[in-house]
Amino acid sequence: LGGPSAFFLGWLSTFKLILFAFGKGPLSSNPPLSLPHFVPIACLPIKFEHDPKHQIPQKKHKSPFSYASTSMVIILAALIPLYGKKEYFHPKFVFFLYGLHMYIGLEFIFATVSAATRKLIGVQLEPQFKEPYLCTSLQDFWGRRWNIMVNRVLHPTVYDPVKNLSARVLGRKWAPLPAILASFAVSGMMHELVFYYIKREKRTWEVWEPSWDATCFFLIHGVCVAMEVGIKKSLRGKKQWQVPRVLSWMLTLLFVLYTAMAFFLPALARCRVYEKATRELTALTQFLMDVYGLYSLQGSHK
């Protein structure tokens, strides 16, 4: 739980409280949020809609196993034993396994948080992922499909202020480009902070060497998204330059996978996050088996 906790508290909660200090964001409302709503919304990646007509209808709400289906959970469990034999696999394939593990794990964690929050405080929640493997552009991937709550937090804290400042110099048409770059740069730095908490080592020059792979990953994507937005603005209305949907899907997915395996996932591997997660999951599984065995033993004596 170290990674998700650092992500929730070290990043999202901090940005939400900054917005709250300026009377903005999900924590600021009229009338004010009650304490049972304020605390989970501040600490967890959830969004509460005050207007009932904007809430997700009950019939459309998905259970956790709609977000992370049983087959995905089985795949996640099947990946863990492979880590013990990773020396037999190509390093790129190992990184692919890490990426698959990360995506399924995040889906399951967010879905579990959503289900628990809905059960405890009765809030209808929106999913944090929207089938990112179906993205047709980088703008589509980062803006509408991957970790939607981060996008909502970065928009008012980084994107909007930089866009308003840039509009005075570049004009409203091109102001989004530096705002996109700034948002991705901040995202990269915040991921470095999360990795620091995951590593759990003192920051000394002997044992802690900063790695900027995650920052490079987000800067590369920021530049590419800004270029994509700029090209779209330049070619707006010119249908002859439209890329076929299937081709754009393949190119986008390949680019995301390649850059993730080249920059983002190696940074996670250096933090030994997967080895730690495997040890902790193994310990948790053994603990639950011991508790179940003790409970069964007591039941048989009765």
Image (cartoon, rainbow, N blue to C red):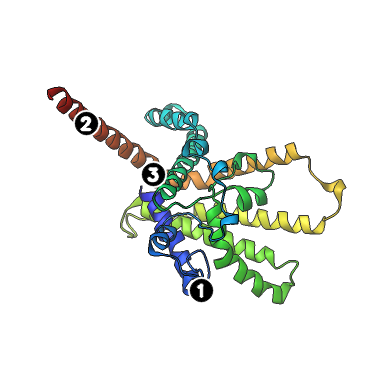
Q: Position of residue 245 (x, y in %)?
A: 75, 40
In the displayed structure, does residue 194 sit left or right of residue 148? left
Q: Position of residue 256 (x, y in %)?
A: 60, 44
The quadrant where residue 257 appears = top right
* Residue position marked by numbered label 3 in the rendering: 273
- Which numbered disc flags the more N-terminal residue, 2 or 1? 1
Cα distance between the residues tagged 1 and 3 = 37 Å
Q: Is residue 37 above or below residue 87?
A: below
Label ID, residue 113: none
Instruction: Indicate the amino acid at tag 2.
Output: Asp
Q: Residue at x 39, y 50 (%)?
A: 120
In the displayed structure, does residue 78 sit left or right of residue 142? left
Q: Residue at x 68, y 37 (%)?
A: 250
Label 2, residues with CA under 10 Å away: few <14, some 14-19, many ≥20: few
Label ID, residue 23: 1
- Which numbered disc flags the more N-terminal residue, 1 or 3? 1
Q: Position of residue 143 (x, y in %)?
A: 63, 53
Residues tagged 1 and 3 counted as in contact (Cβ below 8 A):
no
Cα distance between the residues tagged 3 and 2 = 25 Å
Which of the two discs, 3 and 2, sits closer to the camera?
2
The quadrant where residue 262 appears = top right
Label 1, residues with CA under 10 Å away: few <14, some 14-19, many ≥20: few
| Towards the viewer: 237 or 213 | 237
